[in-house]
Amino acid sequence: MKTHFYLGWFRNFFPEGLKRVLQEDIIDRKSMVMISSNPSTYEDDGATERSWLDQAGIKFDEYHLINDRIQKEDAQKLIHNASVIFLLGGNILKQNGFLMEYELSDWIKKSRAVVMGASAGAINMSAKWLCSKNFGDEVEVSSVYEGIGLDEFSVLSHFDLENNMELVHRELSPLSEEINIYASNKDCAVRVKGEEIDIFGDVYLISRSKIQKLEESL
């Protein structure tokens, strides 16, 4: 059963409910493979994201970071052998381009690993997403990008929803006519396990231009 975690950003560490399900879901702890969102910036090493898992008592025998120092074929092999694949937060567009350049999306989709993404990584895990300067993206014209497509919905992750709800609604309404969108701020997560979707923290569903706050999973 495939398991995907779409994470926001965590100011401290994982909340208890999320920590518990991660401990239950991540059984194989041989190899964690992290995919950079700034592949030419080698300081982007996933230390923060890794610290969340360390604090939850989830540690691996091996840790690998995929950036442009690694050959494409070696990156694909790491993905194939991974227990957990973690798409790091940071620059959504650079990570999206890197996934295409290294042809990693199909490898990730075929993998039996638990797949996680934080912020930018979560957005790139989704089927498609809106790139807009109003969301802080470095573009002049808004456009929709294809993600990996692990699940057939869109994600807006780690955005200040509470103070920008009208903006979010206006920006995402056109895309929401085509595909469901899960929008969240910090300290939030959406877990997809098989056919089930679980919610942790303040997550909103935007569908057919209507927005509603979802009940948190127990």
Image (cartoon, rainbow, N blue to C red):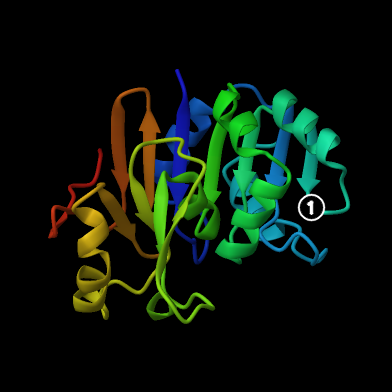
The quadrant of the picture occupied by the C terminus is top left
Q: How far from the left and from the top, in percent, is residue 129?
A: 40, 56
In this view of the protein, can residue 30 be seen by the observer? yes
Residue farthest along the top direction in this orientation: 1
Q: Amino acid at mark 1?
A: Asn
Q: Is 175 located above or below residue 70 in the figure?
A: below
In front of the other: 186 or 177: 177
Which class describes the residues within 10 Å of circle 1: few (<14), some (14-19), or many (20+)? many
In this view of the protein, can residue 205 be seen by the observer? no
The quadrant of the picture occupied by the N terminus is top left
In front of the other: 23 or 76: 76
Q: Is 11 located above or below residue 60 in the figure?
A: below
In front of the other: 94 or 28: 94
Q: Which residue is mark 1?
A: 67
Residue, x 39% and y 36% (percent of image)?
151
In front of the other: 96 or 16: 96
